[in-house]
Image (spheres, rainbow, N blue to C red):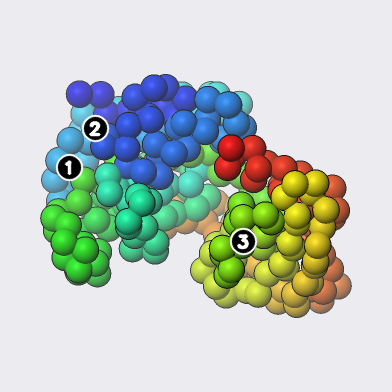
């Protein structure tokens, strides 16, 4: 059984093999500009981590990814992708580990070990029991080039509060997306009419903090939350052209 599955390859479309998160990205990578990466799927990894052979495979795959990205040590996000994660009935949001801005093969291997172990935490097992799922999760790990973003967004192709499908809703904030998805910052809110990309409304928030990449990523993620400069806090994170481009992309992905 192969251990490394590159996002653009057909074997990375199988959620039963690589988990829902990696499978969805793998399907998108065929036609969309998804940052390159691979899914690591050791068969039944032991609690003590990776065998020498598995470690060597992971290090070799990271070297290939770095070469593809044109840098000796590419910054990556290391994220869990459990077989029953991100499905129709279950999300596992926040239950399995994610590490951002990890650099170097040793740090990536350590982050992978932590992600694999996160599937066996009491909190994750309790969630699985509540859903009637087996306590032991098959967890794959996605290693993907990190986009060191000036602005991060979450885009919905339907209104998440009303369910209306005729509009796109965009949340946006400065820096990496961790502050946004973690709820530590109030983001801007933009609403766009889906059929003609007309911007219906804007709510510019006072964005007081943001997540940034630190110079040297390690196994626990090289990011930190910092104050937003006062001159930027009330500034829109997106201009009109970016808002419409994101809404147009949401339509394309929905279709």
Label 1 element class:
loop
Give the mark nearer the N terminus: 2 vs 1: 1
Q: How crowded is mark 3: few (under 14 residues within 10 Å), some or many (20 or more)?
A: few
Q: In this view, does 107 lie above or below 180?
A: above
C-alpha distance separating marks 1 and 3: 43 Å
Q: In this view, does 163 lie above or below 36?
A: below
Could you say which disc has been placed on residue 45 in the image?
1
Q: CB under 8 Å between callouts 3 and 2?
A: no
Foreground tag (1 vs 3): 3
Q: Residue at (84%, 48%) from the top-left corner? A: 241
Circle 2 residue: 54
Q: Quick check: can you spot residue 252?
A: yes
To which quarter of the image does residue 97 belong?
bottom left
Q: Is mark 2 in CB contact (under 8 Å) with mark 1? A: yes
Q: Nearer the viewer, mark 2 or mark 1?
A: 1
At horizontal 24% and vertical 32% (from top left) the residue drawn is 54
Q: Mark 3 points at which residue?
A: 164
The quarter holding residue 255 reads top right
């Amino acid at each position: 059984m192969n251990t490394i599955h590159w996002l653009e390859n057909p074997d990375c479309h199988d959620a039963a093999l690589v988990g829902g998160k990696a499978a969805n990205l793998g399907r998108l990578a065929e036609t969309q500009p998804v940052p390159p990466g691979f899914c690591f799927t050791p068969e039944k990894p032991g609690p003590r981590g990776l065998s020498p052979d598995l470690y060597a495979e992971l290090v070799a795959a990271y070297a290939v990814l770095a070469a593809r990205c044109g840098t000796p040590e590419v910054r990556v996000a290391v994220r869990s992708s459990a077989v029953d994660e991100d499905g129709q009935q279950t999300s596992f949001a926040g239950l399995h580990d994610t590490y951002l801005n990890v650099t170097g093969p040793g740090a990536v291997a350590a982050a992978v070990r932590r992600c694999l172990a996160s599937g066996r935490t009491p909190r994750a097992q309790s969630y699985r029991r509540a859903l009637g799922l087996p306590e032991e999760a098959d967890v794959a790990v996605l290693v993907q080039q990190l986009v060191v973003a000036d602005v991060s967004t979450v885009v919905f192709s339907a209104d998440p509060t009303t369910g209306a499908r005729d509009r796109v809703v965009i949340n946006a904030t400065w820096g990496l997306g961790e502050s946004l998805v973690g709820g530590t910052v109030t983001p801007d809110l933009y609403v766009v009419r889906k059929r003609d990309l007309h911007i219906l409304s804007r709510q510019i928030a006072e964005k007081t903090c943001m997540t940034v990449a630190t110079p040297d990523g390690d196994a626990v993620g090289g990011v930190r939350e910092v104050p937003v400069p006062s001159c930027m806090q009330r500034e829109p994170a997106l201009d009109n052209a970016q808002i419409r481009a994101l809404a147009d992309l949401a339509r394309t992905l929905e279709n």
